[in-house]
Image (spheres, rainbow, N blue to C red):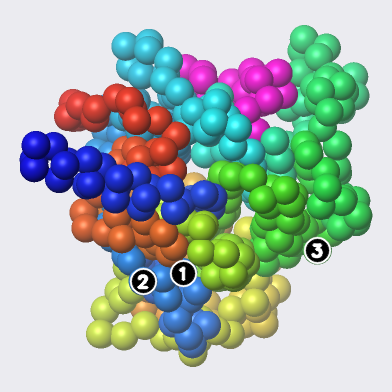
Amino acid sequence: MKRLFTLILISLLVALVFSQVKNVIYFIGDGMGLSQVYLTSMLEGRPLSLMKTPYIGLVKTHSANSWVTDSAAAGTALASGFKTNNGMINILPDGTVVPTIFEVAKTYGVRTGIVVTCRVTHATPAAFYAHVKSRDEENEIARQLVENETVDVVMGGGWANFLPKDLGGKRDDNLNLIELAKEKGYIYVKTREELSKISADSDKILALFAPSHLDPASSRKEQPMLYEMVEKVLEILSKDDEPFFLMVEGSQIDWEAHDNDIYGVWKEVKEFDKAVQVALDFALKRGDTLVIVTADHETGGLGLSSGDYRVDVDKIRNFKKTTDWIMANYSPKDQEKFKKAIEEYFGLTLSDEDLNRISMSKNPKIELGRILGEKVSVGWTTTTHSGTPVPIFAFGPGAENFTGFLDNTEIPRIIMKLTGYSLQYPLLKEPVTK
């Protein structure tokens, strides 16, 4: 009898702890490893907002078929709690379709939102609402987004995947998914000005600010910044004080790291962190909101020193443009203009050997990024993803559960337990990897 009483008491205490998590704000920095975070902190001369969270851990990111994941498999793990093969979204290698945490949350009446700076049909956002064998099926992903209505508020880019070709889109099936979304009650938004005018009383929003991805953070002017979108979506999702689940992706950290572009990574992480601060401010006022910040994988194998026990932070702070912008506006074939541009926008001098390396490279943009990195003692090991574990930062009720050395599949499973969405969530099986 005494044992039964003890078990009942423990169950009640556990239920009380779990019930404290009403809202979840889930940040994913695509390609954001610990080096990307710390380099940005060094350049900003201050701790980033996400670094001030009280609980920190590490996360393994491998997929079902590789120690180095892609964003589709990693997104599936972060959104459903299952390992799958690279390229697959919420479908397991054996063909089993698995539910996403958003789909489960919706059965509990939880409102959902996605805010990204890429196409909303890209791998990470798609992992929260879609089921496809290949991440490249973005037209199908767009159809599932609108028809299934799993996400109440959607903000990002990629309207071309929602429209037929005769309307400037990419669809061959003549489906006009934007009109279908309107019929289903979504308010369609396509400009920063329209977003600012959206009432907080709105229920369903489809905001697509570009035909493809949004502009990079370092040069975005007409389109909204990530923090602006997060501010607006939090107004909308919290208006009636019902539970909500928001996923926010800093999508382009990954792309800048693919380019081995120090400046681009810096500015993307900075923008991402500003959005994190918006969420932390929101959570601080409430006490019922869990904020989680992590990454799907690390990109670039960024090393904070390539020799001589130093990183030339002051020199990097003089950088003013991305390598993508430079290569779009200057040609290394015009050597004098190219050298002057590097001096003007990076404060560095290219040698004849440097120019020869860039001109002879199969990818001049990445070669320029590597050369600039060498001159400020920052190194890169790859132009793709790495298998390095990534950090996780947590704040709010239940945040203490996100410490230690976690697998990425554990994150949504812990969230499910803390929110009480499902007490029968499947047990995790040991993945088979190669």
Q: Position of residue 27 (x, y in %)?
A: 51, 53
Residue shown at 37% from the left, 50% from the top: 16
Q: Are marks 1 and 2 in contact (CB under 8 Å)?
A: no
**Magenta region includes residue 139:** yes
Q: Secondary structure at mark 2?
A: loop
For the residue marked with disc 3, what is the amino acid?
Lys
Vertical placement of residue 294 versus 83, above or below = below
What numbered label is drawn on residue 221?
A: 3
Q: For the residue carrying disc 3, how many other residues have a C-alpha within 10 Å: few (<14), some (14-19), or many (20+)?
A: few
Q: Position of residue 176 (x, y in %)?
A: 84, 19
Magenta segment, which residues?
Answer: 131-151
Q: Indicate the quadrant where residue 160 lies.
A: top right
User: Which residue is label 2 attached to?
Assistant: 54
Q: Quadrant of the C terminus?
A: top left
Q: Secondary structure at mark 1?
A: helix
For the residue marked with disc 2, what is the amino acid?
Pro
Residue shown at 59% from the left, 37% from the top: 110
Q: CA distance from mark 1 to mark 2?
A: 9 Å
Q: For the residue carrying disc 1, how many other residues have a C-alpha within 10 Å: few (<14), some (14-19), or many (20+)?
A: many
Residue shown at 30% from the left, 34% from the top: 63
For the residue marked with disc 1, what is the amino acid?
Leu
Q: CA distance from mark 3 to mark 1?
A: 25 Å
What numbered label is drawn on residue 420?
A: none
Q: Which residue is at the front of the view, 134 or 305?
A: 134
**Magenta region includes residue 351:** no
Of badges 3 and 2, the one in the foreground is 2
Vertical placement of residue 330 versus 255, above or below = below
User: Which residue is label 1 attached to?
Assistant: 50
Residue 141 appears in view: yes
Of badges 1 and 2, the one in the foreground is 2
